[in-house]
Each structure stands twice: as C-alpha cells, then as structure tokens.
Image (cartoon, rainbow, N blue to C red):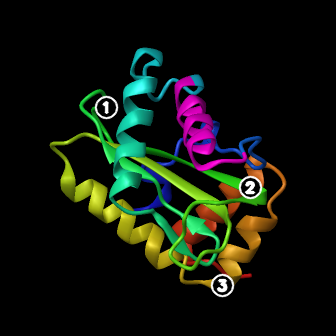
Amino acid sequence: MKFSDFVAVDAIRSDVEATTKEAVIREMATALVDAGRIGAGDLEGIVRAILKREDLGSTGIGRGVAVPHTKHPSVTKLVGTVAVSHEGIDFDSLDGDPVQLIFLLVSPPDRPGDHLRALENISRQLRDDAFCRELKAARAPAEIQHLLEAADSHGFVS
C-alpha cells in the first residue's frame, strides 16, 4: 500500500496550531472533514474513537512520530492525513519525546487488511531517518506531498 492510496493531500497540514494530543487529533480530523473525506456529522464520533484507542496505549511510537488511528463505520474506505508540529506535542510517546510528525488514519471496520497495510507502510517508511527529518522540516503541504510521492515511487532519497 502506498501513501497515495490513503492520504488526502488536501487535508495535509504543514504547521498545526494544536498544542495537545486531543487538539491535534481534532485539527487533523477537521482537515479531513474540510477536504470532504469524512462527514461533518461524524467528526465527534471519529475523534472520540481515536482518543479511546489512545487510552489503550499511546500511538506515539517514538522518534517524534505518532500514528493515531481508528476503525469507524462512517467511512467506506481508508482515509488519512499527515501533519507536522514544528513546536512538538506531548503525545505520551513511548520514548517520552514530543511528537512532530503525525499520521492519522480512519478505516472502515470491515477492511482490517487495509488498515494494517497502511500502518505497515507508515512504519516502514518512517524507519528512514532522512525521510523523517525532511518531513519535520517541511513548511508547506506541497512539500509533504512531494516527499510522500517520492517514498511511494522509489523510496525516499534525500
């Protein structure tokens, strides 16, 4: 699975305003609403579902990265977005460090394979230190989109 299969480029945020875990999740989910990828009436349910998942254990996986995600019946296909916090957000990460890169995923409950493939793709790509560094430094959504496209087509090359 590639980033282009699920990332809504019109929902990418290169400098989030949020300063807390809940606020960044809400800001990213709202970006998906604004992009027409999730319904406005489903926003609160999706935010609650992601926060409930966070209660089970932080999706802050370390090295400044978090991957908040949930399955929700309001979506018919996997959708996600990417955000950067230049200030960093306390996400209760495994390593205790603030999070700067956030990949948010929402998938239909009946498509667990897509959900897992997207998480695997994100995890694999984020093992590349240069890729993470470039994403964290991105100042515009188009820069983030370009980096994701580069990773999709041939792996990231700095």
Characterize the local packing of mark 3: few (<14), some (14-19) or many (20 or more) Cα atoms within 10 angstroms.
few
Residue at image position (56%, 80%) is 95
Q: Is residue 34 above or below residue 141?
A: above
Give me the disc on residue 129: 3
* Magenta-drawn segment: 19-33
Between residue 42 and residue 158, name the one nearer to us: 42
Of marks 2 and 3, the one in the foreground = 2
Whether residue 23 is in magenta: the answer is yes
Disc count in the image?
3
Instruction: Quadrant for the N terminus, please.
Output: bottom left
Q: Is residue 136 left or right of residue 76?
A: right
> First in sequence: mark 3 or mark 1?
1
Characterize the local packing of mark 1: few (<14), some (14-19) or many (20 or more) Cα atoms within 10 angstroms.
some
- Three-letter amino acid code at disc 2? Ser
- Three-letter amino acid code at disc 3? Asp
Percent of width and height locating residue 34 = 59, 24
Res 28 quadrant in image: top right
Q: Is residue 106 above or below residue 46?
A: below
Give me the disc on residue 85: 2
Characterize the local packing of mark 2: few (<14), some (14-19) or many (20 or more) Cα atoms within 10 angstroms.
many
> First in sequence: mark 1 or mark 2?
1
Element type at mark 3: helix
Give me the disc on residue 75: 1
